Image (spheres, helix red, strand yellow):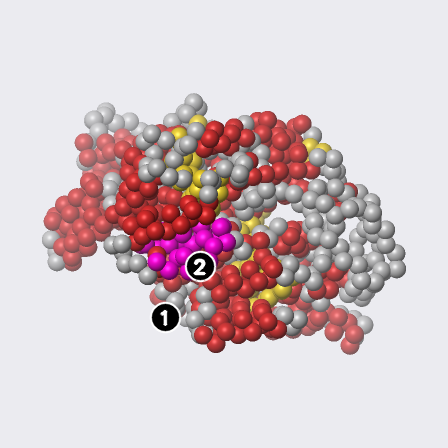
Amino acid sequence: MNKWGVPIRVLSLEKISITQEVTDRLLPIGSYERVTSVRQREVSNSSIRNTRNPYIVGSPINTPEKLFGREVILRNIEENLQQDAILILLHGQRRIGKSSILKNIPFFISQDEFLFVFCDLQVHGNSSLGEILSAIASNIVESLNLESSILNSLLNADSENICSIFNLIFLPLVYEVLDNKKLVLLLDEFDVVTGNEIEKGVDLLRFLDNLVRQPGKLCVIAVVSRYLDTMPSLLQLFRDSSVFKIGLLDEISAKQLITQPTEGILTYEPDAIQAILELSSGHPLFTQGICYELFNKARNEDNLKVTHQNVVNIINHAIDNAEGGLNGLYYSLSISEQVVFSVVAEAQKQNTSENPLKLLENYGVVLTNALEEAIQVLINKDFINKNPIKIKIELIRLWLVQHRPLRNQIRQLEILNAEECDPLYEVANKLRQAGRIQNALDIYKQALLINPNYFKAVLKIAELYLEEENFAKAVEFYARAFQFDPASNQEKFMQSAFSYGRQLIEQENFKLARELFAKILEIEPDNTLASEQLGRLPNSDIDSLMTPEPFVETGRLLNSDINSLRPPEPFVGRKNQIDTAFEQIANRSHLAIWGGIGMGKTYFLQYIASPQVWQEYAVDSSHAVIVRFSCEEIEPFTPSGFWKKVLSLVRDNLHAEPELQANIDIFLTDGRTSPDNLRQVLRELGQRKKFLVLLIDDYDVALVQNQEYSEENMQQFLRECRNLAVHSAEKRQISSIVTSKKRLNEFIPPFNSNQSPWYNHYLFQQMKPFNNTEIEQLLKSLHKPITRELPQVLGEITGGNPTLLKIAISLFYRQQESSNMLNIEEFVNEFESSTRQFFGHIWYSSSEVEQTLLMLMAISALKGRLHKQKQFDVTGIEFIFSQRERELIKLEEQGLVTHTVYYEKNIYSFTSSIMERWVIQELQQTDQEWLQAREKVFLNLMSRQQMDKITRAIKWIWKHQDNTP
């Protein structure tokens, strides 16, 4: 057995010594030496190198020996069934392990008395009651191996009679087959079809209530993820039933989950175990995710001991792998709860957890009842602790700080009550255009009464007061606008504050004027006008001790912490991804590889698809039907086209199975391919001891609508894919690896906060640029002479991008072969010429905001190279960057930029010096018309004053193209 638990099939080896019997247990196998492989693999006598990763991330646990800490709940369920319970409800957070418990009930409870039938209702959110009952009936028929004709009466029934037919015809036939056994329906995602309090869901609840209370042989065990208090009709159904909450593992069970899967193989030091518990708090998904990364690291380093420092080192990798689950938890919350979640995370970061909502005032947010109530709701939902208020699971807090920073999240508050506020906003805009200013102000303020954090209205009110020269009110509203979006509103805030300061001087209110000009200088120290006005003010002022009423609210806003608003082809590397891919395949699980353009995602799939690579990694490929394709080949993309592509390629790979090929031809000839067709093929593959490996490139295409692929089509397609991968009877016959340019959750969020996210079954892995060590490995693999400086030079001009490295290395050795001396200038020029199209592809694949940030970065770097020469002023760019950390993180994840920390500030730069030059050259080709078209984008990122600085810098670049370094 190899390290992925797959039996080794020996064809021709000169030396071999394998004595380990193939079992399900995780035991080390004997060492072996192969001399016929494509490349000699590293061989070690240590057990860790020959053991598959036993931790499971993303998929439900299907085997009892891998389920920890749920014995009490399973025992309670068994006791309830023995006492003739008819309804049992399990509830808890998403990804807490509810599906795993449901799937393991048949293993823990004797099947002599019960027949358990699992049914996933995830895909039936939009189904009718008849379709839901038909799906449940189909699962019962499949579990009992009954003739499908028994379903005919249901399939042919109309909506009015289907409940009667299910109850009076179908179930009695099932009970007759069951004899003395009791039918137990295991209904996963039950709240998807019953939790919205709509007619269909209520009808289903009533029908089940009537069904289970009849004398018979039926029990329903349902699983829900939504907060129970939001589902009164469901609670009514389970009013007299047992309700079990699925929570975090206790400390003993969590320690068992950490240590038992690798007992006798890997040792966890006590402080390492404690560090894992502190990060995961016993959450099974996050505990597994952390241990999964630790095991990979230990295996790669041939290290049999896990230390506290090892845990610290893999935290970011563990967060990346758990991205799907983290997003699923986050999107299950309301907008107010999401914002408060980020508030608490930020408060912990700043050590101000005593009253975390106080932080919102620094961002111009008005505390509403919904925000204040969200704290208690999050406590009730077990996301945060009460005393002190802090996020219960540290790993979630770290993810929130990194990926859901507070400043980015508060803009979501504007969505609340949008159905009421948006029409008012449009009416007010029309009144403003008609010159009816006071009426417009009244309507804008009416929208703010409905949603005090309707920021668009705040900005419009500030603009109107400034136009009307009501400077006190303009400052009041611009101060708030500046707090929630400093980059966009700084200029107008400064303008209104300066005008109001001069007005205060005219009113001889020197004290308030002094405070106002001082605040202006805090924000913009080089503001000479404010400095001059402040210098002219008298040192004392007795006449203006009283603060005018209009300024009271303004003073509160301005006296908040202003500093918080200021800008704070040999295959080399990818070993972890390759190991993970084979482990997911062995587990029949699913992997989502993501990374920027040129990171080698397509080549990675080609590599995994090669039978020779399976042989190199000691994995038997004879039972695998490997299918690889790109979604770009399906044009236009449609679900039917996707299933047709899969079935066609499966057929082409079944040369030794003519009968199965003929069956597939029938599906293809019919012209209406579907996941049901693939399920039938998978069943036949299972009968032949085979399984399907789907390697799907450019999965991004399936996440973009087209004329023949609506949002509804997309939702249905993605639900069908998840159901096939997770809940179908054929899931043990399929494993998939998909690639995309971004994380899957960044393309499309969950369709419904009440459902498990469509991407929940994937383990996420990122393709990053090569580091210096991997660049050296790549060069050594070519068996050509290299200089000591070459890896560093290649890293600088390519940023570690594998595609750029391939181009650069090819050019380098071509030059070296034609001449003993390397002409650096000629080499760089040829590299620039060869990569222009590649950089253009990256550029035009980026959003306008991302392009602008890259421009600012290039201009800032150019300013640095010009030193003290007379050129242009770009002060304040760091402030813009500090407001756009989320976009910069995405650019960094795409491998385009990197950052260093200098005096607690992030300093951003290009990973590739050539791309930086390419961006400057792109700016040289722009003109005044381009600048005007970009103005709106610029103003979304910066103040008009900052835009003017950048515009002058770009115009300088136009005029000095010949001497731009």
In this figure, which residue is indicated by the disc labeled 1?
Answer: 707
Q: Is residue 136 found inside the magenta-colored segment of the image?
A: yes
Q: CA distance from mark 2 to mark 1?
A: 37 Å
Q: Is residue 820 found inside the magenta-colored segment of the image?
A: no
Q: Is residue 669 above or below residue 768?
A: below
Residue 427 in the image: state x and y as whole percent.
Answer: 16, 54
Residue at 25% from the left image edge and 47% from the top image edge:
199
Q: Secondary structure at mark 2?
A: helix
Q: Is residue 478 above or below residue 608?
A: above
Nearer to the camera, 450 or 264? 264
Mark sitting on residue 97: none
Residue at 69% from the left image edge and 30% from the top image edge:
269
In this figure, which residue is indicated by the disc labeled 2?
Answer: 148
Q: Secondary structure at mark 1?
A: loop
Nearer to the camera, 229 or 906? 229
Q: Nearer the viewer, mark 2 or mark 1?
A: 2
Residue 965 in the image: state x and y as whole percent.
Answer: 58, 64
Q: Where, by quadrant of the figure, is residue 795 drawn?
A: bottom right
| Amino acid under disc 1 | Gln
Residue 634 in the image: state x and y as whole percent.
Answer: 49, 71
Tell me which segment is drawn in magenta: 128-153
Q: Is residue 806 left or right of residue 727?
A: right
Count of all numbered marks drawn on residues in the image: 2
